[in-house]
Amino acid sequence: MTEAKHFALIDLGSNSARLTVWAIDATNQPREIVRLKEMVRLSEGMGEEKVLQPAAMARTITALAGFQQQLAALPNVTLRAVATAAVRQAVNQKEFLRQVKKTTGIAITVITGDEEATLDYTGVINTMPIQNALIMDTGGASTELILVQERKLRQVISLPFGSVNLSERFLSSDMVSAAELFDLVTFVENTLNGVWWLRKAQNLPIVALGGSNRTLAKIQRRREAFSNFEDIHGFRMPTTAVNAIFRDVLTKNLTERQAIPGLARERADIIIAGLIPVVTMIRYLDCDRLTFSQYGLRAGTLYNYLNTPS
């Protein structure tokens, strides 16, 4: 009897670390058997100097060591471990990767912003029937934009801002002032103005990825009393509902935000800055709806693995 194959992916983002493991059967079909997430806030306190901080690195290495224990219990595992914006931007990247390898045995590959965006595209295009859209993945320290026309990838860009670094740069952790909000929106708008090809996405639907964007769908589904509010793949949401939720979040202090159904408590301090990019993009493109995807980088990596001749 052939030993079962397993493909494992560690996705080390700026805000969270995730482990996903799939069992691959004899017909090359995957079945997800492990899904773990740890909120590590790796990009916390990086600042203008882009230095990974000791406490954030320690939290992350502890989480990765836990992932490694999970993997050790499985036979015949192919592991791919990737890091995105926080490690990509860090001036002490090499030292951090050395610590991870020494402590956990995990060798992490740092992928470029364009590679991250392309994996997002692969994950979405293999799981959704989209023809023309802008895919938008807002993470902790970067935002990927992908223009899809006739199901083909036409343009990609990775912008160096996300929920964590925008929060740290522009906002207080409790009530957001009008001046802070104005400065943040102006910064995001000016950045989008520099992406020449975005005009080609005018009026196209936005396919939303990333923890902050997905939170919109979870809040809305809680409000509409869906039985499984976290099952958001393919969920469509009119921009009027997006704006209503964002307005509601803006009126609340940190404690009140932590109590919003569908909003994870550990995301409450960064959710306002995390939603600014997509709320701004909706207006920029005059878009009438968001469509949410649960499958981006991780699914894209899986499909690349499945489609690579062994």
Image (cartoon, grey):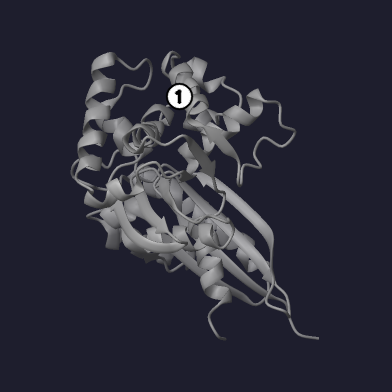
Query: In the image, is 299 to the left or to the right of 118?
Result: right
Front-lying residue, 28 or 204: 204
Task: Identify the residue at horizontal 33%, vertical 55% (top origin).
Answer: 87
- Disc 1 designates what residue? 243
- In the image, residue 95 above or below residue 177: below
Task: Identify the residue at horizontal 62%, vertical 42% (top origin).
Answer: 232
Residue 245 at what x, y percent from top left?
A: 50, 23
- In the image, residue 61 above or below residue 138: below
Regarding residue 262, the answer to whether it shows in the image is no
Query: In the image, is 110 to the left or to the right of 21?
Result: left
- Specify the quadrant that holds the N terminus: bottom right
- In the image, residue 178 above or below residue 210: above
Task: Identify the residue at horizontal 60%, vertical 51% (top origin).
Answer: 36
Quarter of the image for residue 41 reads top left
Residue 276 at what x, y percent from top left?
A: 36, 31
Front-lying residue, 173 or 291: 291
Query: In the image, is 306 to the left or to the right of 48?
Result: right
User: What kind of residue is marked 1?
Assistant: Asn
Task: Identify the residue at horizontal 49%, vertical 63% (top origin).
Answer: 122
User: How dense is the environment of label 1, judged by Cα within 10 Å: few (below 14), some, or many (20 and up)?
Assistant: some
Query: In the image, is 125 to the left or to the right of 35?
Result: left
Front-lying residue, 163 or 49: 163
State how many labels appear: 1
Front-lying residue, 153 or 305: 153
Regarding residue 210, the answer to whether it shows in the image is yes
- Specify the quadrant that holds the C terminus: bottom right
Residue 158 at what x, y percent from top left?
A: 30, 53
- In the image, residue 307 above or below residue 85: below
Q: Secondary structure at mark 1?
A: helix
Residue 10 at what x, y percent from top left?
A: 51, 60
